Image (tube, rainbow, N blue to C red):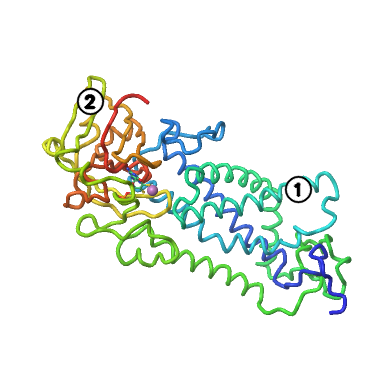
Amino acid sequence: MRDHPRLPSSPGFWRSPVRGPRFTSVLGLVLLVGITVLFVTGLLSYAAYNPDLASVNDKTPDKGLLGFYLFDWPTNPHWLYRFTQGVHVTLGITLVPVLLAKLWSVVPKLFALPPARSLAHALERLSLLLLVGGGLFVFATGVLNVQLDYIFPGSFYPLHFYGAWVFFAAFLAHAALKTPAALRNLRRMRAGQDEAPDVTPDRGPRATAGAAPHGTDGADLISPRPAPPTVTRRGALWFVGGSSLLLFVTTVGRGADGLLRRTALLAPHGGPEPGSGGNAFQINKTAAYAGVRPVETGEEAWRLVVTGRTGTVRLSRADLLRLPQHSAALPIACVEGWSTSDQLWRGVRLRDLAALVGDGDAPPDVFVESLQRHGAFRHAALRANQVADPRSLLALHVNGAVLSPDHGHPARIIVPAAPGVLNTKWVARLTFGDL
Ligand SMILES: Nc1nc2c(c(=O)[nH]1)N[C@H]1C(S)=C(S)[C@@H](COP(=O)(O)O)O[C@H]1N2
Ligand SMILES: [Mo]
């Protein structure tokens, strides 16, 4: 080892025989598909909040042009957000080993000297900085938010949202440049050709650095002085895939109930353990956490204030129970990726409540306010199409039981296909009208 290079800028410093165009190409192509799905489901998640409807729904008020694609979030199929956000979070967690392995596989390039050989090369390296930095940033903010439950109070959404746009722009540029070569490498691999037949350890760093041997794209990833192998490339790929699989099987259960949910070892299950009877499903924030006290929710004190075109009505829980009761089987699906299976909710249709205040024929939007005094999710705006859906309820019961305090007693909103944040608990006021 007398002349082993000591600086990471020297190609001979990096000695793993696993590095090479094939390893990088396989991981790159997995990320090409995976990150595209993450980006699309992420944009959908933002659209599902109805951010263009009211400022209380808009978690990134300075989005500017980046909100160009927003559309009216539908109410069908009723599991829509459960599916898109389950995919977003589960896939994001599953891809972490692939991302890390991909970065590891190209790390020598980050140190390569000279920093820039030309203006084009300088620009390429700058875009790589955005790519690597952006990727780490978006994955880290996403994982931390899911794991630690809102550690960036109020700022997670803008951070993750802007980060995603920067990252995806750099990612697209990178993919456009590299995908053809990655596909060629994969085809060669399938044809069983040697990776780089003319790169041998004794030719030294100078001879191979940057010079692709015949037809092999990215041959500069191959160490000019490979150490003796401890694992084959195939073995290393299996290791990455196995790590992803392990993360997947310990995460995916967050979208299930009962025993399956307990397999979600790595991801929080979405808060405290559920209660009992009909209310035995996941709770996000408890009444105690939200500062909602029993004296405010009792039969004596609580009134629902409904306002619309023709005025205001005040209803007790007993009044609400005298209105026509309807049922709907709908899940709770949180932005954090956990969800419940369909629960059987029972209560008053939102469109019937709109009709009480003169907005019966074509129900308008509604602004929903909770008893809760602090916290970002104490109010939300719902769109007219959500109000009009016959499954959209102000629920009083769930699965045959009276709503528990933690699930929103005396009354909560439940809307098909919507993210959990729009299902306001401990509702005190509904204001109908175009927002
Ligand atoms: N008033 C109020 N309603 C709320 C919340 C809240 O913090 N306060 N959290 C929302 C979020 S983020 C979710 S995921 C669902 C969870 O409902 P659950 O606790 O009944 O499962 O409630 C929603 N309704
Ligand atoms: Mo949530």
Give the image location of residue 45, x and y in percent.
45, 44
For disc 2, the neighbor class at 10 Å (few under 14, some 14 to 19, many from 20) is some
Q: Considering depth in this image, is 414 or 367 the residue closer to the camera?
A: 367
Q: Nearer the viewer, residue 197 or 117?
A: 117
Residue 163, given in percent of the width and then of the height, sits at: 59, 45
* Left or right: 2 as drawn, with respect to 23: right
Q: Which amino acid, mark 1?
A: Glu
Q: Is residue 401 left or right of residue 165?
A: left
Residue under the image location 18 percent in, 41 percent down: 326
Mark 1: secondary structure: helix
Instruction: Say which element carries label 2.
Output: loop
Identity of the residue drawn at 42% across and 40% down:
48
Residue closer to the observer: 122 or 210: 122
In the figure, residue 303 lies in which quadrant?
A: top left
Q: For disc 1, does the CB lie below 8 Å from ligand 2?
A: no
> Does residue 206 lie above or below 329 as drawn?
below
| Residue linked to disc 2 | 360
Disc number for residue 189: none
- View extreme (top): residue: 310
What residue did someone put label 1 on? 124
Q: Position of residue 9 (x, y in %)?
A: 81, 62
Is 274 located above or below residue 1 in the figure? above
